Image (cartoon, helix red, strand yellow):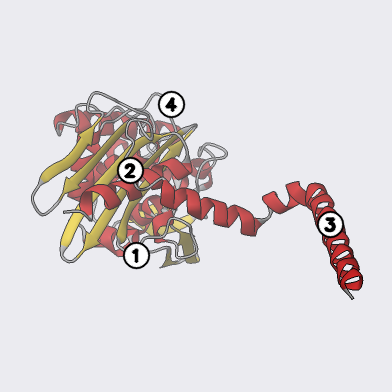
């Protein structure tokens, strides 16, 4: 009886060893496929995001970073004051600020083939078609999907308004950029230098103070607040409806970075420089968080979330 029991244990042990060996071989053969699967990657990303938002690691995460208390009108965190990183699509905020000094929201803008063909290839688009739009719609197309085509359309129309008929689209756009730079200097945006209405330029630079100031200014406009906090936004035009996906992943419920207290504002990416402006609202308190020149898309979202976890939510 004892011998029979011992044989059963030995048999069971052998079976377990064989099963374990088979699993080990299967895992070895499928290891790369397993680790590359979306489920494993998603779990890994979530763990990484949680772990790396427990501590704010500026300047490891970005070149410049600030947290501004909008209720108290004061910075809670400010690092990288002397840095002037590439402005990327955040330049659209300055372009809109200037445009608002020139036009009304219901003014009619024309989008034509000549202008649309000038938009840099491979840049972010609102996918506008030729036709007419209101100035408000063009500005929202610049804010939500960060449409470079919309920025060029705005520049064309304001340039034409200044110079009159008889010039090329390129001349109108160049005039707009020149006038925009004059406006920035006059308004005291001393650390911002732009060369393109959309931000498609490696030479264009800005800093925390200028970005913070122009963002606070635009947040006073209802049409900005109307579109910036939505993950998806639709406008109705004579050319039909346009539905855009917001470039800010904090607004996307399907995104790893989703945060229900983030209400906008804007992202900007050029080459390996990743920028984001995040408006955080909770219990009547409002904070503006700016991250400039993060090293990757994930880094900018982790840095902002880390600031929320370590600075804002501990107040």
- Residue 150 image point, x, y percent: 42, 48
Observer-side mark, 4 or 3, equals 3
Residue 193 visible in the current orientation = yes
Which of disc 1 and disc 2 is earlier in sequence?
Answer: 2
**Mark 1, residue position:** 260
- Residue 257 image point, x, y percent: 43, 55
Give me the C-alpha separation between circle 2 and circle 4.
Answer: 31 Å
Observer-side mark, 2 or 3, equals 3
The disc placed on residue 202 is 4
Which of disc 4 and disc 2 is earlier in sequence?
Answer: 2
Q: In the image, is residue 188 above or below residue 242?
A: above
Observer-side mark, 2 or 1, equals 2
Quick one: label 2, few (<14), some, or many (20+) residues within 10 Å? some
Direction from residue 278 to residue 141 in the image, left or right: right
Direction from residue 64 to residue 219 in the image, left or right: left
Q: Residue 263 occupies which quadrant of the picture?
A: bottom left
């Amino acid at each position: 009886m004892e011998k029979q029991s011992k044989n059963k244990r030995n048999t069971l042990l052998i079976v377990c060893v064989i099963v374990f060996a088979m699993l080990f071989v299967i895992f070895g053969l499928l290891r790369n496929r397993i680790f590359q699967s979306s489920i494993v990657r998603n779990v890994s990303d979530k763990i990484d995001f949680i772990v790396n938002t427990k501590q704010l690691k500026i300047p490891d995460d970005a070149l410049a970073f600030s947290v501004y208390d909008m209720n108290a009108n004061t910075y809670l965190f400010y690092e990288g004051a002397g840095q002037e990183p590439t402005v990327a699509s955040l330049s659209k905020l300055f372009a809109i600020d200037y445009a608002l000094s020139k036009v009304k929201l219901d003014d009619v803008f024309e989008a034509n083939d000549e202008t649309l063909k000038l938009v840099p290839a491979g840049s972010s688009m609102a996918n506008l078609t030729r036709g007419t739009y209101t100035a408000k719609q063009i500005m929202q197309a610049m804010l939500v999907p960060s449409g470079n085509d919309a920025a060029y359309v705005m520049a064309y129309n304001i340039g034409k308004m200044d110079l009159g008929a008889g010039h090329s689209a390129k001349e109108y756009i160049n005039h707009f950029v020149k006038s925009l730079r004059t406006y920035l200097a006059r308004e005291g945006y001393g650390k911002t230098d732009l060369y393109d209405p959309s931000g498609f330029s490696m030479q264009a630079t800005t800093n925390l103070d200028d970005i913070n100031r122009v963002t606070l200014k635009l947040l006073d406009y209802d049409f900005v607040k109307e579109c910036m906090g939505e993950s998806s936004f639709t406008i109705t035009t004579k050319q039909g409806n346009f539905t855009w996906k917001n470039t800010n992943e904090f607004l996307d419920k399907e995104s790893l970075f989703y945060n229900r207290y983030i209400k906008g504002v804007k992202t900007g990416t050029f080459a390996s420089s990743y920028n984001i402006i995040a408006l955080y609202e909770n219990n009547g308190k409002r904070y503006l968080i700016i991250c400039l020149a993060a090293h990757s898309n994930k880094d900018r979202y982790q840095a902002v979330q880390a600031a929320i976890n370590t600075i804002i939510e501990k107040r």
